[in-house]
Amino acid sequence: MSSTAAVAAHGAHAEHHELSFLRTYIFSEDHKMIGRQFLFMALFMMSIGGLMAMLMRLDLAWPDEQWKFLGYLPSFLQSDSAITPNIYNSMLTMHATIMIFFVVMPILVGWTSYAPLSAVPIYTGVDWGQDLWCISLIVLGASSLMGSINYITTIINMRTKGMYLFRMPLVIWSLFITAILLLLALPVLTTALALLLFDRMGGTHFFIPSGGGEPLLWQHLFWFFGHPEVYIMILPAMGITSIIGVPSAIKTFNWLGTLYKGNIHYTAAMLNALAFVAMFVIGGLSGIWMACTPVDMYIHDTYFIVAHIHYVLFGGSLFGIFAGITYWYPKMFGRMMNETLGKIHFWITFTAFNCTFFPMHILGMAGHMRRIYNPTQYEFLKPIQGINLFISMSAFVLGSAQFLFLANIVWSLIKGAKATENPWNANTLEWTTPSPPPHGNWPGTVPTVYRGPYEYSSPEVAEDFLPQSQLLEHETAAAD
């Protein structure tokens, strides 16, 4: 179906009609409701992943301590009121899995189970847990693959009249490229997970050396997915906050050039977008160190790597997520988020984030390894244990600050100021429909696009913005 025919078909069925509770909230075919489902699921999983991070930092700050409150947690998270090495490794695995696959990817769209340790249960003592991990990611990979096909098909076939590819907003471009990357990378990961599952349950030896398998094959297959995954997670955040460019230095100069002499409104959304830029740049600079082989030989698998990945992915993706939720919240729910609470959340998060992750560079330079349960077992790490304590205290503040964000989301749903159709004076099409949009997205005719999405400070209009669907006099004459 051509894009024009698809839009016509959509317009013919855009009228509102009542749906049952299950069809509206559970088995919805409305992209807006599906987006809300992804959002709330990801926020819930963020709480779970964040709890695991806090427990890991608790152990790193005070190794082998007994904590009475741990006795109230599920048995798989504690043992005799202490975090054991096995529990620590399990939380490390699940923290990375949850934050990558169930938080960052669903909102915007770690441990790597290296074979042969992951392929032979007796090596780690993990049996069904590893099997279920493989099965869950295979199912997730299949669903993400279907979602990617849906994104690509929708963007190609369902554009409104006049919405040429180069008139699409950058956030749509970023989701489009992300979907293509997922389409290319996910089948490889799913295949690798299936082979790992066969090794564990079917008696094969794809990754087990004793049977003629090759452990490095897992690394090659995993990282065929793993490196594109970095861009899969960061590209939607880039689409939310700016213009996409390659290489990263071009993006940085573009960000600075766009901000230079701009009329910047320091709203909570803009503050988070600016933090995304700053944190991504710091993470990118530390990445240059790792690209230098002599340096990388020393800092490889140390906390320097942990600092780098968190500056790029937490500082990048999550600040982008905070910016995106704050910006599109009025369109999603018809109410504004509390601006004061949003700024308080930002400043606490921004400060605590840097206090948590920047000192990890120092730990890495001192030789502090990743994935160790008790750093005080090593004499050369004992003098820097105070830094671990400082990082953990900062992490607790960082984790606690997220309750402000969740509270703002819930409170604003009930008591937030009613949102107008276009509270940000934005140009893209979603701001031409009521907040929140009705079942058919637009109550009347689907709008036509006449220009690009970022026509600000145009000399053709008195206002500082010029919506894509606004028809000017000379355009009317040309159309006639």
Image (tube, grey):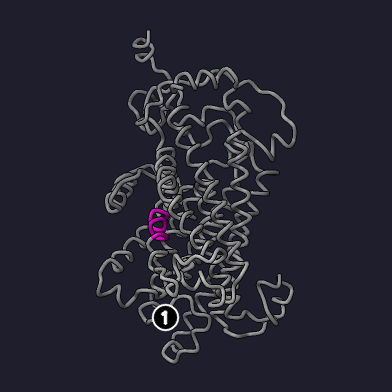
Check disc 1: other Cα within 10 Å, few if <14, some if 14-19, many if 20+: many
Q: Where does residue 237 sit, x and y in percent of width and height?
A: 44, 49
Q: What residue type is labelled 1?
A: His
First to last magenta residue range: 221-229
| Most common SS among magenta residues | helix
Quarter of the figure with residue 473: top left
Q: Quadrant of the C terminus?
A: top left
Residue located at (44% from left, 23% from top): 3
**Closest to the observer: 365 or 275?**
365
Residue located at (62% from left, 60% from top): 47
The image shows a total of numbered marks equal to 1
Quarter of the figure with residue 12: top right
> Is 285 above or below relative to 334?
below
Q: Where does residue 197 sit, x and y in percent of width and height?
A: 54, 62
Give the residue furthest to the bottom.
379
Residue located at (63% from left, 85% from top): 65
Quarter of the figure with residue 170: top left
**Closest to the observer: 269 or 230?**
230
> Is 414 above or below relative to 366?
above
Q: Where does residue 30 sit, x and y in percent of width and height?
A: 61, 33
| Residue under label 1 | 368
Residue 279 visible, this orientation: no
Q: Is residue 228 magenta?
A: yes
**Closest to the observer: 62 or 468?**
62
Residue 303 visible, this orientation: yes
